[in-house]
Image: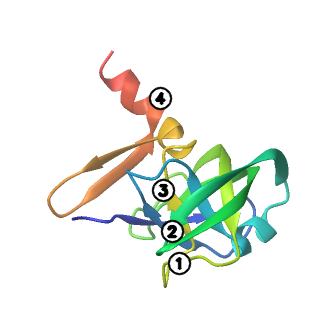
Amino acid sequence: MLRPVVAISTPGTLPTFPSIIDTGGPVTVIAQEILESADDARPLDDSILLHLGGASQRMQLWELTLELRPPRSHAGAEPISWWAVAAATSRFPHPHCAALLGHGSFFGACMVTLGAEEFVVEPADRFTQRFH
């Protein structure tokens, strides 16, 4: 199964974080480092119980702006920003990745087209406009 990985960040920050596009995930889950890099993060009065990496944990839900950065090979491509609701954890279970971009907010903002060997991510409104 293809597990597309993209680079995300918070607006105005230099580091990017490898992130898995997770079509089965109910919400976006981010590592604590991403949350700490956000200037606009605010906690919600809610949490969610998630099963990740063989363990269950209750995670605080946050609102923050996330930004998908295009690959360097796509010069001139614009980042895609969205207001996200995300669960944050200090025990992220996937090595070499810092987020799971799930249905909660990511797929409302972005459309992902998967091919056999490549994938495309674009703003959801741009995709919709093309077919209407």
Q: Secondary structure at mark 1?
A: loop
Residue that mark 1 sits on: 93
Q: Residue at x 48, y 61 (%)?
A: 70
Q: Pointers 1 and 2 in contact (CB under 8 A)?
A: yes
Q: Quadrant of the N terminus?
A: bottom left
Is there any visible trace of residue 10 in the rendered image? no
Q: How far apart are the alpha carbons under marks 4 and 3?
A: 19 Å
Q: How far apart are the alpha carbons under marks 4 and 1?
A: 32 Å
Q: Nearer the viewer, mark 4 or mark 1?
A: 1
Q: Residue furthest left?
A: 116
- x and y percentages locating residue 16 in the rendered image: 60, 72
- State which tag comes first along the sequence, 4 or 1: 1
User: With 10 as the anchor, is 125 left or right in this view?
Assistant: left
Q: Pointers 4 and 2 in contact (CB under 8 A)?
A: no
Q: Residue at x 29, y 21 (%)?
A: 131
Residue that mark 4 sits on: 125
- x and y percentages locating residue 9 in the rendered image: 64, 64
Q: Secondary structure at mark 2?
A: strand
Give the vertical position of 65 relative to 125 (above or below).
Answer: below
Residue that mark 3 sits on: 76
Q: Secondary structure at mark 4?
A: helix
The amino acid beneath tag 1 is Pro
Q: How far apart are the alpha carbons under marks 2 and 3?
A: 36 Å
Look at the image and name its color scheme. Answer: rainbow
User: With 126 as the anchor, is 39 left or right in this view?
Assistant: right
Residue that mark 2 sits on: 52
The amino acid beneath tag 2 is Leu
Q: Pointers 2 and 3 in contact (CB under 8 A)?
A: no
The local crowd at label 3, few if under 14, some if 14 to 19, many if 20 or more residues have their Cα within 10 Å, is few
Q: How far apart are the alpha carbons under marks 1 and 2?
A: 6 Å
The amino acid beneath tag 4 is Asp
Q: Nearer the viewer, mark 4 or mark 3?
A: 4
